[in-house]
Amino acid sequence: MLIDHLIKKLSDLLQKKEISSVDLIKETYLRIEELDQSLHSFITVKDRNIALKEAEEKDKNRKDNSSIIYGLPFAVKDAYVTKDLRTTAGSKILNDYHSPYNATVVEKIIASGGILIGKNNMDNWGHGASNENTNYEIPHNPWDMERITGGSSGGSAVAVSTRMVPFAIGEDTGGSIRNPSSMCNISGLKVTYGRVSRYGAIAYASSLDTVGPMAKSVEDLSYLLEIMAGHDEHDSTSSKEKVEKYYQHLGSSIKGKVIGLPKEFFGTGLDPEIKKTVLTATQIFEKLGANIKEVSLPHFVYGISIYYLIALSETSSNLGRYDSFRYGDKRELFSNESVRRILLGTYALSAGYADKLYKKAQKLRTILIQEYEEALKTCDVLVSPVTPSLPSKIGEMISDPLKNLLEDLYTGTVNLVGAPALVIPAGFTEKGLPVGLQIIGKKFGEGELFQMGYLYQQETDWHKKLPTILKNK
Amino acid sequence: MVKISKDLIDSLSKLAKINLTKEQEEKYAGEFSSVMGYMEEIKNINVDHIQETSRVAKDENVLREDIVKESIPQKEALKNSKNTNDGYFLVPAIFKED
């Protein structure tokens, strides 16, 4: 199908008028109709006729210098407010919430000519690593229908993995883009904190939340970031750092680059098949001329505790706004997972415990930042696994709150530090489950991550593999 | 393992304004203990003289000109509320009459 092509190819075909935006929209809706009854990657889908009308206008108004995504369909995690479609954040509390404005990232993609198709399933409020914590239908992993998609941006990962849309926008607070990207075999980017505006992103933990693209390849991510990134007067934490033409990093040699393997990331708890896959991937980088070096982040072992004490403190505060008066339904509709997180955060911030827990976690955050900086002084990037476990069977993890939290082991500390991290497909287990690889960079070093990831995708074809559910179509 | 009492859960739920049933309090007390037991590992690490990090964005005191700009119309701002009157949100009374 047409949507199987990468963004550049689609754009070329559209510019040459060999295909139309209407063709693409028709395909998108066909795929959603065929597959989403069983996959549940969307919570809300736009009316097909409205999308087709938008596509007709795009076909009519296309110019020689139209953006590379002009006329392409896309989806966003339901954590982004949108004017035309309801926004739920995966929770019944916002079941009928209609925002009066669009999130900045949505505005930017639409301004470049993207056609918003729908809102993707997610763990409510971003609370989860499996997408089972949604108040809507639990999405299924297209690589094994009995298994979780990963989370919290699970719906977006499924929609891209099954080529319902050429790309989607996810949100990552502690691994929410990276974890489902790895579990569904797509490419995903957690940006540097401040690289993309958070305005209109429903807040989970404000000092950790980031807005990033999810797509079929590193090349596609590089085009998308250029469109999404930049300062926004509505988000005082958005950076004025120059937005690059990230695609210019693609194709240049990585000879002599130093890749750090943090030894704490390969310790106990890591699934042996994931470990093997990641280490095999590092050999490809060696073949491309990079040097591998072992590094150490001694306080990494406390990473999950530090991450959760801060994230849950912030979420207990952020979710205080749902009072059911100005918008939304009553607080008793928070799911078990969210109530647990709100209560834990309230505890960590409460009199008598704030110094021992919240403030202590903030001090340890400083130490982690220093340790990452130290490691990235001697290395260009760090390479690691994405999750400690393979996608579990649906229902297994929801009964074990601690296991759910531990899924963020290799991703959560990156948010504490504010660094960018790219996830790309790196292989499959014996049972055919996808395994991703994480490349962590220096702040605002997204270009270097694309450079590494792009060359890896020239040497491998993991990212081109399609789930069986598609091959049967 | 840290022992979390139902009373603590009760007082936290009041702070967080979430009404819980007795069964829920019991359930959360149990789950809380296992998660807090894990997280309290940080209690004994020495972090004296270390500065706290509350944010990783570089800019400080981000200001803007105080200029009136177009805003959302009142009707739009109120449209998601289930209880409004004469252009206001209706909320439960806070003060009791004597």
Image (tube, coloured by chain):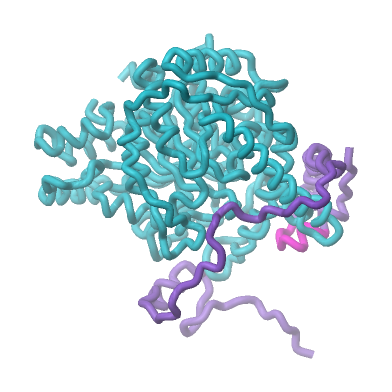
The chain coloured cyan in the image: A
**A151 or A357: which is nearer to us?**
A357
Left or right: A195 in relation to A339? left
The quarter in which the C terminus of chain A is drawn is top left
Residue placed furthest toward the top = A430
The quarter in which the N terminus of chain A is drawn is top left
Residue at the image position 44 percent from the left and 70 percent from the top: B79
Residue placed furthest toward the bottom = B98
Is residue A436 a member of the stretch shown in magenta? no
Is residue B13 a member of the stretch shown in magenta? yes
Among the 4 quarters of the image, the one containing residue A29: top left
Chain B, hue in figure: purple
Among the 4 quarters of the image, the one containing residue A148: top right
Vertical position of residue A169 compared to residue B70: above or below: above
Magenta extent: B11-19
Residue at the image position 44 percent from the left and 43 percent from the top: A212
Vertical position of residue A231 compared to residue A213: above or below: below
Residue at the image position 66 percent from the left and 44 percent from the top: A337
From the top left corner, tell me how far across and down residue A372 is, in percent: 63, 37
From the top left corner, tell me how far across and down residue A42 is, in percent: 42, 41
